[in-house]
């Protein structure tokens, strides 16, 4: 067979060069693949190449990593393969850890090991190094092409292309921005080329009072794609005219545009010189709440809750504005339908809104506050239990004669007993005890005890 060489003592050994040339391990080298036959990569260098390919989402290019390269223990490509006496090959670190735990069997075959020596599999290591070197070379070539194209697009939009031309306008500008957006979304490393070519200043300048929503949509999408925004860029983006355009797109754009606008505002809020009054806009708050209520787009719900939570934290006067647009009953109604990762930020927002009189009144007046909060006790996390307990304490303290009996009817008493008997933090147990006393004071003893027993029996 052409892929093997005969040994003088009999038997055959895999011929690396022929195997790579004939493509039996994932395709033959292409012209210009200088590293295709490089089998001398050290484990550290090989691991660096693998990590860079994985970070770029290009671990195997257009081909799957050959199964023979995968360690059966970690299911990751090997960099230092060694072979056991059973003939099975593993990554050295993984099998050494297995043996150090006292195992004396082969992890794959479960055969008892008569010899625990680890024999380096130099042939396989060379094949792995050659295969990944070829992938890495092609990846670098593609990256260079993408980087060059991104830089060309930025220069064309700025009017600094060679030979020098006027900046792209009209449909040509939109087409260039869309291509740049696609490059940034599919190749994360392209964002660096955009920054180096002056793309951030360009994109920032495109957002203004006379910018069409089509151009603004593409510019915002690129800005939130991973492009590094320096302090000057963030300061420029916080100008009222630019913020106004972003808010308009938040209210009128498609779902992905709304999500990108929210993410951009969230990025700007991390800047040291951010002015809290920038987010004190009813139009902005209404747009964010619309996005949160749109359950068709989970990413939008997450982004919207994160932004609203940040606004509550950095600008206390905005809390009353958030309450005024009906956020409290809307968030309370959404609680049972939210994904697990969204429940905690939603409760954080409601907790922050309950710090203002209007927020507390809105919580008390919402008919779903008590049953939804009771349902969340001891359900998601201790943090969620703490927030839900705080909501119940707020409404029951405001109107004990009205709310305490309603809470007991919703099953609060049994849930509070669970909190008290659980491994929760002491202050949480103390709060549960105080709320339990408050409920008992506003409920007849006989009915209170029977309700506790009945609820616990049902649960």
Image (tube, rainbow, N blue to C red):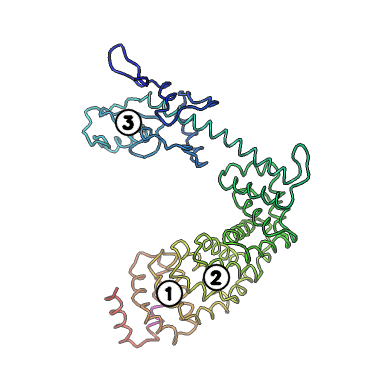
The percent coordinates of residue 1 (x first, y second) are: 34, 20
Q: Which residues are magenta?
A: 435-439
- The kind of secondary structure element at disc 2 is helix
- For label 3, the crowd category at 10 Å Cα-Cα, with few meaning under 14, some 14 to 19 and many 20 or more, is many
The percent coordinates of residue 48 (x first, y second) are: 49, 34
Instruction: Name the one closer to the observer, 422 or 361.
Output: 361
Q: Residue furthest top?
A: 8
- Dot 3 or dot 2: first in sequence order is 3
- Dot 2 or dot 1: first in sequence order is 2
Q: Are marks 3 and 1 in contact (CB under 8 Å)?
A: no
Count of picture labels = 3
Q: What residue is rendered at 72% in x and 54% in y?
A: 206
Q: Is residue 379 left or right of residue 10?
A: right
Q: Nearer the viewer, mark 3 or mark 2?
A: 3
Q: Quadrant of residue 458?
A: bottom left
Q: Mark 1 sits on what residue?
A: 372
Q: What residue is rendered at 37% in x and 82% in y?
A: 409
- For label 2, the crowd category at 10 Å Cα-Cα, with few meaning under 14, some 14 to 19 and many 20 or more, is some
Instruction: Name the one closer to the observer, 157 or 429.
Output: 157
Instruction: Name the one closer to the observer, 218 or 80.
Output: 218
Q: Mark 2 sits on what residue?
A: 352
Q: CA distance from mark 3 to mark 1?
A: 55 Å
Instruction: Name the one closer to the observer, 30 or 450.
Output: 30
The percent coordinates of residue 354 (x first, y second) are: 54, 74
Q: Mark 3 sits on what residue?
A: 89
Q: Nearer the viewer, mark 3 or mark 1?
A: 3
User: Measured along the vertical axis of the image, is residue 411 above or below residue 307?
Assistant: below
Question: Does residue 436 belong to the magenta stretch?
Answer: yes
- The kind of secondary structure element at disc 3 is strand
């Amino acid at each position: 067979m052409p892929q093997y060489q005969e040994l003088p003592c009999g038997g055959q050994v895999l011929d690396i060069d022929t195997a790579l040339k004939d493509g039996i391990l994932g395709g033959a080298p292409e012209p210009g693949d200088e590293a295709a036959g490089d089998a001398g990569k050290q484990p550290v260098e090989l691991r660096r190449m693998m990590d860079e390919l994985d970070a770029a989402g290009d671990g195997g290019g257009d081909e799957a990593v050959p199964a023979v390269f995968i360690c059966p223990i970690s299911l990751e490509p090997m960099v230092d393969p060694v072979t056991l006496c059973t003939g099975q090959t593993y990554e050295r670190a993984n099998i050494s850890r297995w043996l150090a735990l006292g195992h004396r069997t082969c992890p794959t075959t479960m055969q008892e090991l008569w010899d625990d020596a680890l024999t380096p599999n130099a042939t396989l290591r060379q094949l792995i190094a050659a295969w990944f070197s070829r992938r890495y070379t092609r990846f670098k070539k593609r990256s260079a092409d993408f980087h060059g194209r991104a830089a060309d697009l930025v220069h064309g939009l700025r009017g600094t292309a060679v030979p020098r031309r006027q900046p792209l306008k009209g449909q040509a500008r939109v087409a260039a921005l869309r291509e740049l957006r696609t490059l940034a979304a599919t190749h994360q490393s392209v964002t660096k080329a955009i920054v180096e070519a002056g793309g951030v200043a360009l994109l920032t300048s495109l957002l203004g009072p006379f910018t069409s929503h089509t151009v603004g949509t593409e510019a915002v999408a690129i800005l939130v794609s991973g492009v590094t925004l320096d302090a000057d860029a963030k300061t420029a983006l916080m100008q009222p005219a630019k913020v106004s355009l972003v808010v308009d797109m938040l209210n009128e754009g498609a779902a992905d545009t709304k999500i990108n606008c929210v993410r951009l505002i969230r990025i700007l809020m991390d800047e040291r010189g951010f002015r809290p009054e920038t987010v004190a806009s009813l139009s902005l708050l209404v747009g964010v709440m619309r996005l949160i209520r749109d359950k068709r787009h989970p990413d939008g719900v997450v982004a919207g809750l994160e932004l609203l939570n940040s606004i509550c934290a950095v600008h206390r006067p905005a809390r009353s504005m958030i309450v005024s647009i009906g956020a409290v009953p809307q968030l309370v109604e959404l609680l049972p339908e939210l994904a697990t990762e969204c429940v905690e930020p939603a409760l954080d927002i409601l907790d922050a809104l309950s710090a203002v009189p209007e927020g507390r009144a809105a919580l008390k007046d919402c008919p779903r506050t008590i049953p939804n909060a009771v349902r969340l006790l001891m359900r998601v996390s201790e943090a969620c239990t703490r927030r839900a307990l705080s909501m119940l304490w707020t409404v029951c303290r405001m109107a004990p004669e009205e709310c305490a009996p309603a809470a007991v009817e919703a099953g609060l008493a049994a849930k509070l007993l669970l909190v008290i008997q659980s491994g929760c933090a002491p202050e949480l147990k103390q709060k549960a005890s105080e709320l339990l006393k408050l409920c008992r004071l506003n409920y007849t003893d006989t009915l209170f005890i029977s309700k506790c027993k009945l609820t616990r029996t049902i649960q």
